[in-house]
Each structure stands twice: as C-alpha cells, then as structure tokens.
C-alpha cells in the first residue's frame, strides 16, 4: 500500500490522507493502522487538558519549540500535535483559531499539527484519537501532544491515552466557570498554572496544593517551580526515584516564561516512567483498554443494529412509568426477535 | 408470592430473605423485584460516602435518629440503611464493626439496617445496591441511606443512585491517606466535615471551599454551617430556589453536634429536588442508566460465555507484542466460531 510506505518514509501528504481515512473509519484507514501498528510504541505521548481560556495551545506551541530546539544541547525531536475538541462536531476548523498562533511552527517539517472533533467512529473519540496518535508514532514523531479542550469525562478518557498528562489551569477565570473539574486532577502527572503573570495566581496555586495534599500526593509538591526561576539545563531529579509527585508549574506561555522548567519536568517524568517500567505498564494498559472498548462498542453496536430505536424508547418509557421492571425490560429488549 | 406480600405488609423476615435472594441473583429475587417494582419510587435515597475513618456510620446513625424523632415536630419517617463495602468480598460481617455502634437504632421497627459487599451479580454492585434499595422502598422505608466505604469509581457509581449525595471528610487523616478523591466532590450535594472537634478542621474546610470555588460552585457555600450554631427548627432556605450550592457542614457525630443543621440541609435538598423537577429527572436518569448497564453487562456476559478465556488472554498478549493490530484482535475475538 503506497500511502503506508509514504508514511514510513515521512511523506506528510500520505500521513494526512491516512489520518482522514482513520477519522472516517474507512477500510483503507483500518488497513493502514494494521500495517503500521508494528512500528508504534516508541513515541512519548503527552496529554494536555484544561478549561478553555487557560492557554493550552500557546503552551503546547512553546513546548514543541523547545523539543525542536532543546536549550540543553540534546538532539531535536520530531513533534506531532493532535488537538481534540470533544464538544465540536467539526473536524479541521474546530480549533483553527488556536492553530493560528502556531504559525511559527508550521513550515517546520519536524512538526505535524492536526485538529480532530467528534465522529461516530467505533470506540468513540478516545479510540479515534489513539489511532491518529498511532499513525504519527509510526511516522516517526517522537513526541506527540494530545491536546483536549475542557475537562469532562471524555477528556479524562483521552488524557488516559498519554504516558504523561499535563493539567493546565489559569488564575482569574471566575468562580462559576468550571475551571477545574476535580476528577481530572486525579490523572495529572504535572500541573501547570499558565498566565501566571495575571493576578490571583497565588490563590490558584494554593487551591491546587490543597487538592493535591488532601487527595493523592505526599505533599512535597509545594511551589518548587516558581515563575521567576529560569535555567538552561535540566537539573538532576532530587525526589524519590520510585515515586512521582505531581509538580505545580507556573508559566506565562505568551511571554515564554517558565516553559523550560516545565520542559525539564516532562523529561524527568519520561525518565521516571522508563526507570519504573511504568512506561511499558501504561502502554499495555492502554492497549487492553482499547481492545475492551472496541469489543463492548462492537457488541452494543451489533445489538443496536438489530433492535429498532423505537423499541428501545418505548421500553424505557414503560420502565419509567413502572409498568415494566428493569429485568422484564431487559428480557424484552434481548428477545430473540430483535437479536438473532 | 408470600414473601412479596410479607414485604408489602412490613414483615422484616420476608424483607431479609428477599434481600438475600436479590444479592444472590436468584430467580425468586428477580421475581420479587418484578412484583415490587411498581411500589418503588417514593423513598428519598441519600448516598453517604467518604474515606474510612471519617465517621460515616456514626453520622448516619445520628441522622437516622433525627428522622425517627424529628426535633421540629414533623412526622417520624421509616429509615433504611444499606452499608456497602465495594472492597470486601464478604456480606453481612463486612461492616459489622460499624454496625455495633448502631445499637441504639436496632429494636426500632422503623429502622432496617443491611450490609452488602461485592458479588458477581449482573450489572455489578451498583445495580445490586439499587435493587436492595428498591426492596426497602417498596417495603415503605421513606428515607434510605446508602453508605459506601471509600471514594473510588465504584463508590461514585453507587452514590449516583441517590437523590442526595453526602460526601464526608474529617480533619487530621494525614496527607498521604487518600482522604478525598477529587472526583467524588463533583457528585456532592452536601459536604460534611465530621470530627469537627478535632484539630485541623479549619484547613479541611478551607481546602473544600477552594475546591468548590475552583470547580463547580458559585462560591456562596463558604462556612455558613458552623459547628457552634444549633437550632431546633429548620430555617427557611434563603438561596436561589432554582440553584443548589453544596453547603459545607461541620459535625461531631459522637457528640451529636451539628447534626440538626445537616438534617435541615437534607430536607432543603429534598425540597429543592421536588421544586425543580430534579427529583423526577434523577429518578428517570437512574432507571435509564440501570437498563443500559444491564444491557451492556448481558451482552458482554453472553459474549464471554461463548469465548474461552484463554483465547482472550492469548489475543491480548499478541496485541501487546504488536503481532496483531487492535482491529485484527477485535476481528479475531468476534470470529463466528466463538460467537454464533
């Protein structure tokens, strides 16, 4: 298959076409995934999530720049960026506004940017995103950012695809904006308070510290990474090598402050994952989850294709009116007429 | 069916037997659920969750006492208590230690207490707990506490069964104890800091306030309900009648302080649910979720019963070694030999 060979040789047009095939769940897309799957498993997948307005795209932009031009003299890495908007039904244009800010990255053949949005693909958006990340992985992108808008259940699932999950917060978003859904903090490997030059940053950092200390940390993460501290080399990690404590970073992406410290934390976390075999474990857990999701989705889809929607709705209404018990409703829905 | 009639007449032995039938997923248990289902939907389901050591059982004990002997002269209500331990494989004895403290409630025919633990019942522990709550509901218990140990994913699912969810916290549990899993706060209708006579209570309250303000509240919940304030009548609610802001209560259950305020919040929340049709909406959403869970569980179970476990494991391992792609693994697992 020509496109598959193109991807392995680094042809961007071939990669774009195959991604479209995967998004549309075409036979070509599936075939390509099959053929490219043996070449996957090398990239560092970095999930980036947080509420709209926290400046995630600028942050990813800056980090990608550092991977392309590392300040510490380490080799430049190829960077893929997958921007996912689970709330938008449109692909491509969905996060275009953000992508405009990525202008300084485009034209660099070592960077590939793609926006994705909701489709009815088998296994849902999480599976679809994973599939696109696999294509980028096979195409030789060594660092892949998976950026999601929002912080709901879908974002959590998408973030779980990653080796390293960054949760981005910003001060002054107002109290009633759902700035942080608490659930997302559970999956954070690194916390970032972006726009740290704005007022109210101390409150945001303090609240994050409280949540970490209460919930799922040993409390050593308090404010080590301040906005002011700048360096050009990543320091040796001083913490327990077997234990990861989510650090809280303060950054101001548009002023390029705090980005290098954050970049070092990403490197540290990758080293931690490799040292503790957590890298392999997360990769395997991801594959297993993907398989189970495909399986359940396929079983349910097959059932739905054999059961008229009107039957399901009518059954649900009878259940709500308490004319049918849950088991009777189940029995009715599983009746051989619809199923066999 | 004699047991079903017994339950409707308030016979405790009949109720106990049917609960056992439901727990063991016997045909009698299912039949009873079918016959009793039309009598359900009246009880106020109150979920109570939080880490071990926060004193949930004492709190439920005290609240049950108030429902039995309301201080404001409202009629006494019948109270069911379902104590669930998702981590324990044993039923009955699991939370017996806690139940000993309920001594002053036993002997009261208006109180029924039952402990439950993990079983392989269809739909999982969440479905099973819901089924037991339905039996108590049909038996005429007007308030049903569903108390879970811990605050993981299963507890969240169990708590979602309730109309009103109480999340219980306590000061001084230490930083590394997973005192709060952040995710559970999202589902809290009422927050309780129990053991509020212990040192460190201010920090716990402040941390909860930060989390609420950051995440999912309009910030009006700050410390209205202090340990010191005691009253005998529930006050008129002064907040926006269309909007519920999770209050933070401070209680010391073993000293019986703060319980009446909490009791009033429970009444207020019930009134709020009824006023906004949220009561009906939560009930319907619960039924739909139950039906979908039964459906997915049944489809997966049927698939598993037709697919040897060794086949699944071997396929997973080939996937991990990247000998099979996810789609090929899926195709292999869905092959007609195992399925048809």
Image (tube, coloured by chain):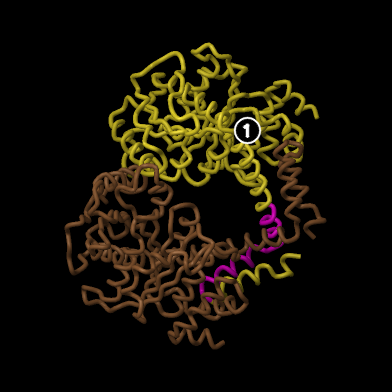
Chain colours: A brown, B yellow
Which chain contains the residue that carries disc 1?
B
- In the depicted view, which residue is nearer to us: B106 or A231? A231
- In the depicted view, which residue is nearer to us: A220 or B166? B166
The 10 Å Cα crowd at callout 1, few under 14, some 14 to 19, many 20 or more, is many
Q: Is residue A15 above or below residue A260?
A: below
Residue A288 appears in view = no
Residue A122 appears in view = yes
Tell me where residue A102 sits by quadrant: bottom left
Q: Position of residue A229 (x, y in %)?
A: 17, 59
The residue where tag 1 is placed is: B133
Q: Residue at x 22, y 62 (%)?
A: A257
Q: Is residue B7 above or below residue B177?
A: above
Q: Main secondary structure of the magenta part?
A: helix
Q: Is residue A301 magenta?
A: no
Quadrant into which the N terminus of chain A falls: bottom right
> Magenta part of the protein: which range?
B298-322
Question: Is disc 1 placed on a helix, strand or loop?
Answer: helix
Q: Residue furthest top?
A: B73
């Amino acid at each position: 298959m020509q496109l598959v060979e193109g991807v392995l040789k680094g042809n961007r047009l071939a990669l774009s076409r195959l991604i479209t095939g995967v998004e549309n769940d075409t036979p070509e897309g599936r075939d390509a995934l099959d053929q490219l799957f043996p070449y996957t498993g090398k990239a560092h997948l970095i999930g980036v999530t947080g509420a709209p307005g926290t400046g995630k795209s600028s942050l990813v932009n800056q980090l990608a720049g550092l991977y392309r031009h590392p300040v510490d003299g380490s080799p430049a890495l190829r960077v893929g960026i997958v921007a996912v908007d689970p709330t938008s039904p449109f692909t491509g244009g969905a996060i275009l506004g953000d992508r405009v800010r990525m202008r300084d990255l485009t034209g660099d053949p070592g960077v590939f940017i793609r926006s994705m949005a909701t489709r009815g693909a088998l296994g849902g958006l999480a599976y679809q995103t994973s599939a696109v990340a696999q294509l980028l992985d096979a195409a030789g992108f060594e660092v892949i950012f998976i950026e999601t808008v929002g912080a709901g259940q879908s974002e959590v699932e998408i973030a779980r695809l990653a080796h390293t999950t960054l949760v981005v917060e910003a001060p002054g978003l107002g109290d009633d904006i759902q700035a942080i859904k608490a659930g997302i903090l559970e999956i954070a490997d690194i916390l970032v308070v972006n726009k740290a030059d704005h007022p109210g940053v101390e409150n945001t950092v303090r609240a994050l510290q409280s949540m970490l200390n209460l919930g799922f940390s040993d409390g050593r993460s308090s404010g080590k990474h301040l906005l002011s501290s700048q360096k050009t080399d990543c320091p040796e990690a001083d913490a327990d090598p077997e234990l990861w404590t989510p650090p809280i970073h303060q950054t101001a992406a548009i002023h390029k402050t705090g980005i290098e410290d954050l970049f070092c934390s990403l490197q540290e976390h990758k080293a931690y994952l490799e040292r503790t075999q957590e890298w392999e474990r997360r990769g395997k857990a991801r594959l297993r989850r993907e398989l189970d999701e495909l399986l359940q989705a396929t079983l349910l889809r097959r059932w739905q294709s054999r059961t008229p929607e009107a039957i399901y709705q009518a059954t649900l209404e009878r259940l709500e009116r308490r004319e049918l018990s849950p088991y009777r409703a189940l029995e009715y829905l599983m009746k051989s007429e619809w199923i066999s």
